[in-house]
Image (spheres, rainbow, N blue to C red):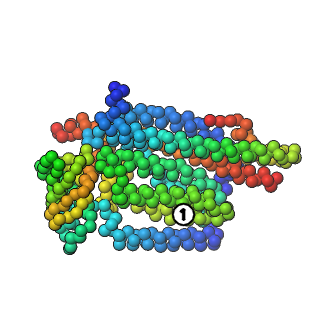
């Protein structure tokens, strides 16, 4: 069914794509940074500390998004025994982990001037920390387990269990009373962020997404070369 | 003007450290992934050089190996 | 369409996931007390017995209730149904203001009085420039 995902065809694209992605990433990041740090207005209550939102929120979105993707691909990899799915999920994990860490750290830096504390054990923050642990487990499992097929299975199972955490992260602010504010961007309703602040947020999200694509492509190429490396032994 | 952007009415240290942390961790991740990539390429190259003439020709006939080889010869970003 | 093995794997995985989701749901349900970060003044009114444990109360700072002296600050947390008075020694966060969200962590003296050890400001999900806020208020 998934035979159209052919390694050699993919590699001819993924090996050339990184430089273009890198180029676009740098441009979008520069515009985004100027917009976020200089041009966008301050908030009526949080003043300039609102600018931390432009790195915190995109990081959190992408960390959650990547894990969601890994979880779904893991289903595919377990059910259809598709090698490519597990290579893709493996290559997605590093950027997801980095975005999760930046979301936690920048959130902490944002919390000090606004809430008055670096850390609070509220359900949004704790569930985000659990996601971070899942990322660590996932990446470590790939490293620890020697046997290839076992590594495929165990990492997929970790990702699928981690998937349960995703709706908890998303809805924690609605289900329980938390220190963390509810979402500003909703699917069905208007956002509660002023358009002049939505622009840098969108730009930074685009830049961060491009960065995760860049890292994904480089990691994916590394994995493909690794496989081919083993293939050379068999010639 | 410059002063204003740096201080941000007292929030400057928080804002700049948040942005700084993000960009530094991006840079570190990029370096690590890049090093892994180059290392794997070099390993492939070294292995390829050790092959006999016939094996090399055999490998070159397979599309994926051609792609990997051309990628290694044309060093990128 | 798919082989028998594939179907069995789908069945196995969905059952495993369902079991895990239910387990997590039950655990969270039974831990609800601890999952919530703070209680509202109404919930404080309705608790059966006061404990000496640290507790967090959250709500809005009642308008006109802030009384600050040299080293002490007193204010009232309200959820528009019930109120609770708070006294606190120390510096409050920048965002602490009348009519804004607040979480006070400390010890209950009785159902109407909390001695806070820590004050956290809670802000909402609205972000806009000061000029827009002013324009909104004028309308």
Category of crowding for the residue at label 1, using alpha-carbon neighbours closer than 10 angstroms: few (below 14), some (14–19), many (at least 20): some
Q: Is residue B16 above or below residue C109?
A: above
Q: Which residue lies furthest to the top in this view?
A: B1
| Residue A217 in sight here | no
Question: Can you say which quadrant of the picture contains the N terminus of chain A?
Answer: bottom right
How far across and how far down the image is residue B35, in percent?
Answer: 63, 43
Instruction: Please name whichever residue, B47 or C16, is drawn nearer the observer in this view of the structure.
Output: B47
How far across and how far down the image is residue B67, in percent?
Answer: 72, 43
How far across and how far down the image is residue C45, in percent?
Answer: 17, 67
Q: Give the SS element for disc 1.
A: helix
- Name the quadrant containing residue B1: top left
Q: Residue at x 31, y 61 (%)?
A: C37
Q: Residue at x 50, y 65 (%)?
A: A161
Q: Residue at x 38, y 56 (%)?
A: A125
- Name the quadrant containing residue C54: bottom left
Chain identifier of the residue bearing label 1 in the image: A
């Amino acid at each position: 069914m998934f035979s159209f995902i052919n390694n050699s065809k993919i590699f001819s694209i993924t090996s050339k794509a990184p430089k273009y992605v890198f180029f676009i990433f740098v441009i979008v990041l520069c515009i985004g940074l100027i917009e976020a740090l200089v041009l966008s207005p301050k908030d009526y209550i949080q003043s300039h500390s609102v600018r931390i939102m432009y790195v915190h929120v995109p990081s959190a979105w992408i960390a959650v998004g990547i894990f969601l993707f890994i979880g779904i691909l893991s289903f595919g990899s377990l059910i259809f025994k598709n090698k490519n799915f597990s290579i893709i999920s493996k290559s997605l994990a590093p950027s997801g982990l980095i975005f999760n860490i930046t979301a936690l750290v920048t959130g902490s830096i944002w919390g000090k001037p606004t809430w008055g504390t670096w850390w609070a054990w509220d359900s949004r923050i704790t569930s985000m920390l659990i996601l971070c642990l899942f990322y660590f487990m996932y990446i470590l499992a790939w490293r620890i387990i020697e046997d290839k097929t076992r590594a495929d299975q165990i990492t997929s199972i970790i990702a699928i269990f981690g998937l349960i955490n995703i709706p908890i992260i998303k809805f924690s602010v609605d289900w329980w009373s938390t220190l963390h504010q509810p979402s500003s961007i909703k699917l069905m309703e208007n956002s509660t962020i002023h358009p002049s602040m939505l622009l840098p947020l969108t730009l930074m999200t685009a830049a961060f997404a491009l960065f995760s694509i860049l890292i994904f492509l480089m990691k994916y190429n590394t994995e493909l070369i690794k496989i081919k490396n083993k293939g050379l032994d068999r010639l | 003007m410059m002063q204003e952007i740096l201080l941000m009415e007292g929030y400057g240290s928080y804002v700049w450290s948040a942005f700084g942390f993000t960009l530094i961790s991006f840079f570190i991740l990029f370096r690590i992934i890049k090093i892994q990539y180059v290392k794997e390429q070099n390993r492939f190259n070294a292995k390829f050089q050790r092959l006999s003439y016939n094996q090399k020709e055999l490998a070159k006939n397979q599309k994926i190996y051609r792609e990997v080889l051309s990628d290694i010869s044309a060093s990128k970003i | 369409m798919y082989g028998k093995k594939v179907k069995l794997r789908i069945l196995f995985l969905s059952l495993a996931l369902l079991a895990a989701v239910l387990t997590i749901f039950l655990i969270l349900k039974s831990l609800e007390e601890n999952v919530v970060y703070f209680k509202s003044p109404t919930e404080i009114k309705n608790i059966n017995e006061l404990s000496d444990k640290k507790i967090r109360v959250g709500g809005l700072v009642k308008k006109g209730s802030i009384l600050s002296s040299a080293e002490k600050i007193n204010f009232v947390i309200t959820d528009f149904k019930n109120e609770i008075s708070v006294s606190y020694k120390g510096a409050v966060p920048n965002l602490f203001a009348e009519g804004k969200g607040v979480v006070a962590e400390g010890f209950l003296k009785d159902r109407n009085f909390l001695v806070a050890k820590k004050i956290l400001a809670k802000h909402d999900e609205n972000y806009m420039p000061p000029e827009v806020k002013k324009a909104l208020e004028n309308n």
